[in-house]
Structure formats: C-alpha cells, structure tokens
Amino acid sequence: MTFQWTAVAAFLYGEIAMAEDFYVSSLEQNGSILEQDVPYNNSSVDRLVSCVLRRTVTLLTQLAKEMASHAALETQVNDATEAAKKYMAENERLQEALSGKGDGKKKESADATEKKLKEEVEHLKAELQKTSNAFHKAKTEVAAVKKQSEGLRREYDHLMKEFEQLQQNSNKAEDRKDL
C-alpha cells in the first residue's frame, strides 16, 4: 500500500514540477514581465494551484476506486478459493465413500457400527423367537382350554338333562303319592 502512495506522490510532484517549468518558461518567453521584475500574476498562480489540486483530487478518486475494485476482486478470489477447497474436500470424501476406502478411524467406526447393528439384529431375532414360542404355547393352551370348555359344556348339558329327568321322575312320584 505504501508503494502505491509513494508512486502517487511521485507522480504528483512530477506534475507540479512540469507545471512550474511550463509556467516559468511561458513567463520567460514573455520577456516584458521578467524585465519589469513584476511578481507572478496571482490569478495565474491561483489557476496553476487549482489545476494541480483538481488533478490531485482526480487521481486520488481514481486510486480510491481502483483500491475498492481491488478489494472486491480479492474478496471474490478468496471466496472462490474457499468454495473450491470445500467442493474438492466434499468430492474427495464422496469418492472415498464410493470406493470404500477411508482412513482407519472411519473404517473402524463403520465396522463398530456394523458390529453393533449385527448384535442388535441377533438380539431382536432371539426376542422374536421367544415371542413366537410364547405365542405358539399360548395358542396351544387356548386350544386346550377351548376343548376342555367344550367337554365341560357337553357334560353340563348331559347333567342338566339328567337333572330334568330326575325332577320329572320326582314330580311323578309325588303326584302318585298325592293321589
């Protein structure tokens, strides 16, 4: 940055020197002013200073615009570089995942996860088998209870018929006694 300002200052000093040389040479050409030993015309000096200041402001404005443009370009380059690095890392990670290659930690982690999942599957299979066995046992017991219930119902019906017959016989016997 200091190099830029040094270059700007050198350019401005060069312009001032050239302007002074031009002004002095134009005064020398006009010998009548020098012969009369009249000091520089204030309006001429004012115009010279005004031109130099205007040129300085113009150059400083251009420099500020260029610096802002440079900063914006630098930011864009940095952002593009970061994005490219990010995309390259993502691409590399995806390629490793696709090829099955990975560093040892990732592979160990995947192996450990796979082992845990297999253990969980085995555990769930064992629980399913236990539940299935319990279901079949309960189903068998329900069938046995139904069979037993059916037998008890038939026995009850049989006993009720016998009871009715006994009651009818008893009623007939009492009717005979009454007569």
Image (cartoon, helix red, strand yellow):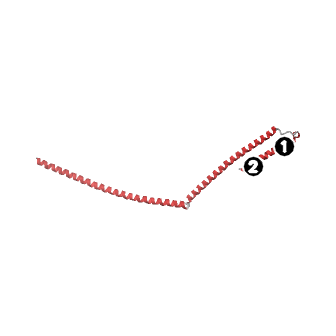
Q: Residue at x 82, y 44 (%)?
A: 20
- Left or right: residue 76 compared with residue 135: right
Q: Residue at x 59, y 56 (%)?
A: 89
Q: Which mark is first along the chain, 2 or 1?
A: 2
Q: Nearer the viewer, residue 145 or 59?
A: 59
Other-residue count near label 2 (Cα within 10 Å), few / some / many at <14 / 14–19 / ≥20: few
- Numbered tag placed on residue 7 in the rendering: 2
Q: Where is residue 16 drawn, in percent x and y? A: 79, 45
- For this orientation, the residue located farthest to the top is 43
Name the secondary structure under disc 2: helix
Residue 94 vertical position relative to residue 64 in the rendered view, above or below: below
Quickly name the residue at label 1: 24
Name the secondary structure under disc 1: helix
Q: Where is residue 31 drawn, in percent x and y? A: 88, 40
Residue 26 vertical position relative to residue 173 in the rendered view, above or below: above
> Residue flagged by tag 1: what amino acid is it?
Val
Other-residue count near label 1 (Cα within 10 Å), few / some / many at <14 / 14–19 / ≥20: few
> Residue flagged by tag 2: what amino acid is it?
Ala
- Left or right: residue 29 compared with residue 94: right
Q: Where is residue 115 drawn, in percent x and y? A: 48, 61
Q: Nearer the viewer, residue 91 or 59?
A: 59
Q: Nearer the viewer, residue 9 or 75?
A: 9
From the image, state whether disc 1 or disc 2 is nearer to you: 1
- Left or right: residue 136 compared with residue 14: left
Q: Where is residue 28 drawn, in percent x and y? A: 87, 42
How many labels sit on residues?
Answer: 2
Q: For residue 90, which quarter of the picture?
A: bottom right
Q: For residue 129, which quarter of the picture?
A: bottom left
Q: Residue at x 43, y 59 (%)?
A: 123
Q: Residue at x 24, y 53 (%)?
A: 156
Label 1 and label 2: CA atoms lie apart by 25 Å
